[in-house]
Each structure stands twice: as structure tokens, then as C-alpha cells.
Amino acid sequence: MKIVFRWFGAGFDKITLEHIRQIPGISGVVTSLMDIPVGEVWPLERLKALQKQVEDAGLALEVIESVNIHEDIKLGVPTRDRYIEAYIQTMKHLSQIGVKVICYNFMPVLDWVRSELARPLPDGSNTMAYNHDYVMKIDPQMLSKAVGEQSNGYELPGWEPDRLKEMAATIAKYQTVTEEQYWQNIKYFLDAVIPWAEKYDVKLAIHPDDPPWPIFGLPRVINSRDNIRRFLELNNSPYNGITLCTGSLGSDRANDLPSLIREFAGEGRVHFAHVRNLKFESDKDFFESAHLSSCGSFDMFAIVKAFYDAKFCGYIRTDHGRMIWGETGRPGYGLYDRALGITYILGLWEAIDKIESY
């Protein structure tokens, strides 16, 4: 496996590449061009400059997160073909700078949803949290306003201003889209882009819905073992894969994370992994904890062992961390707690490897 770190780019992240380079075991960063509107082609010259910046810091740039899908593609409207062509051109440009995996999602309107971005914890740290009743009762625009007020001035992935200003109107468009139609829209996209992914040798890795249940009446379909299997069978190319996010899938207690990892990573269909822990407060209420098993509700040893047993050789990054030691910044994406998580995961992997070797 290769350990990578989410970095939002100069001007969008207070964490520097020099800081990331000092994390033991790190191989590269996962990044994107945050200022390119969804649906537009990512310019090759910008990508070459980004590649040089990362490589000059002694890091690799092999994973992009995310090249977002335009809502017209998700809705299945006639203009989708124009945006699919732009997506393919961006894939070509990314292949030209050595990118091997693109993480994306097919969540409508919103990506991840949380009710709090800085929940105080007893140890003095703070973290992101989800309260199901709060989210189910709040107006979407009010939720958008609350997220903006807690963002510390950062543009959050999945909550970009161009999305938020059209939120109500876009949600209304989905009211006439059935879940089956949504599946067909996913297949249309896959069938259009996967042949080019194969040509450019870039693997596509869809991120699960976060959380994995319907919100605001919008379809959420990448959320369970059976639905992941259905998604992969929409296009059987090995270039059509998933980002296995333990936090997103694990939010539903019915999802057996080690079993999912062994099945899909064992088939070579997990191209990227987000590994984090969370602590349940009820069936659907949780906060994002430290990565240590005893701090949350997941058995992190069992999760890492499942990746090991599946002979996973893809990319892993620690996901949403707490803000600790007085750090401030982009909610969920501080330096220190994610770096601790990396050290913990590498420690588990080393221990498993040595035990298996005896």
C-alpha cells in the first residue's frame, strides 16, 4: 500500500508540503485544482505546475480527489454529453502528469453532511459530528448557512459556493428523478468514460455516500455491499472501482467493514481507501474520533488486517481528523491528528506483516 495525505493546494490549505513530507511513511499527496468550476476542463499547464510543486517537495502526485461530476450528468439531462467530454479531457491531462487514480462521487447536490464542524470533546480537542434528527428537520439552505459559519473561512469540498447558491433549485430538479433513473445515469457516465480511463491508464474510484442514507429526498445509492456490487457490475472494467471509505460506509452499522474490504479489495476493485474511526452515540448519531480503536466504534486492527489479507497495494489516506494541540484550520483536515492516524495505521500494518511472517 501507499500512504498519501489530502492537501488542498497552495492558497487553499494552511498545511504546507514541507510539513507533509515530514510525516513518517508518507509517499505523496492527494490534491485537486480547487478553483476550477465543476464541469470545466483542468488546464494541462496548471497541472504540470502543480506536479512540479509537489515533486519538488519530495512527494508523488498519483491520486486526484476530486474531479467532481456536474449535476447535469447526475440528472441525465441532454447537456450532460458536453460535461462528459470535458471530464474525459481532464482525465487525459491528468494521465499526462502521471496520475493513476481519480476519486469522485455521484452524490446529488451535496457530498458529505455534518451537523457540527467543531464539536468540543472532553480531552479539549474538537471534531465533526452528525445528528440525524437535526439534519432531517433543518431546511437545506439553513444547513448550508450553518456549514458556512463553521468553516473557518475555508471553501469546503462538496460545499462550494457555486453549488450552494443553486442548492434549492437543484434539489427541486431531483424530485422527478427516480432511483432507477439515477442508476441509469450512473451507467451512462461509466460507459462513456471508462473506455478512455482504460486508454489513459487512469482508474476511477467512486466515493460512497456520506452518510449512506437519503437526505432531503435525494437519491443515495453507493451505500451498501449489494449496491456496491450493482455499481461495479454496471461496467465490469477493472478501471471502474471504488474508494472504500470506512467512515462513510461504517456510518451504517449494517455494513461489515472488514467483509467489504476483503470482498472488493480482494477483487482488485478498491483503488483508493479512506481510513478513519468514528464513535456512535445512537444508531445514526456519531462524531469523528481519533483513529485508535478504543477511541471509537470501529475495530481498526480488523480493518487494516482485512486490507492486508486482500493484498491491497493501492493508496490509503487517513480521513477526517480532530483538531488537536490548539490547531485551527479546515474542519476535519488538520495536520496533527491525521499524521497520528498515519503512524497508527502503519504500526498496525507492520505488526500484522511481522506476525504473518513468523
Image (tube, rainbow, N blue to C red):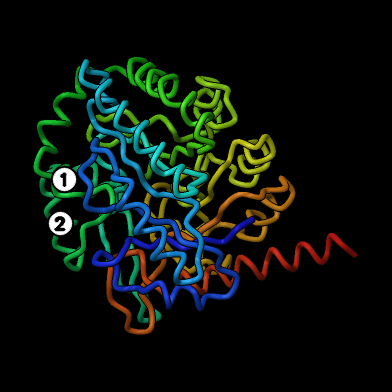
Instruction: Report x, y in % for residue 125.
Output: 36, 77
105 with respect to 331 (left or right): right
Task: Specify the label residue 138 is tagged with.
Answer: 1
Instruction: Name the residue: 34% across, 67% down.
Output: 127
| Relative height, residue 168 to residue 290 (above, below) | above
Instruction: Report x, y in % for residue 342.
Output: 55, 68
**Amino acid on which disc 1 is placed:** Ile
Quadrant housing residue 129:
bottom left
Q: Secondary structure at mark 1?
A: loop
| Relative height, residue 172 to residue 116 (above, below) | above
- Residue annotated with mark 2: 146
Quadrant housing residue 78:
top left
Instruction: Report x, y in % for residue 300.
Output: 61, 60
Instruction: Name the residue: 52% across, 23% down.
Output: 230
Task: Verify CB contact (< 8 Å) between mark 2 and mark 1.
Answer: yes
Q: Is residue 143 visible?
A: no
* Circle nearer the viewer, 2 or 1: 2
How far, Cα to Cα, is label 2 from label 1? 10 Å
Instruction: Name the residue: 58% across, 41% down.
Output: 270
Q: Is residue 140 visible?
A: yes
11 with respect to 61 (left or right): left
Q: Secondary structure at mark 2?
A: helix
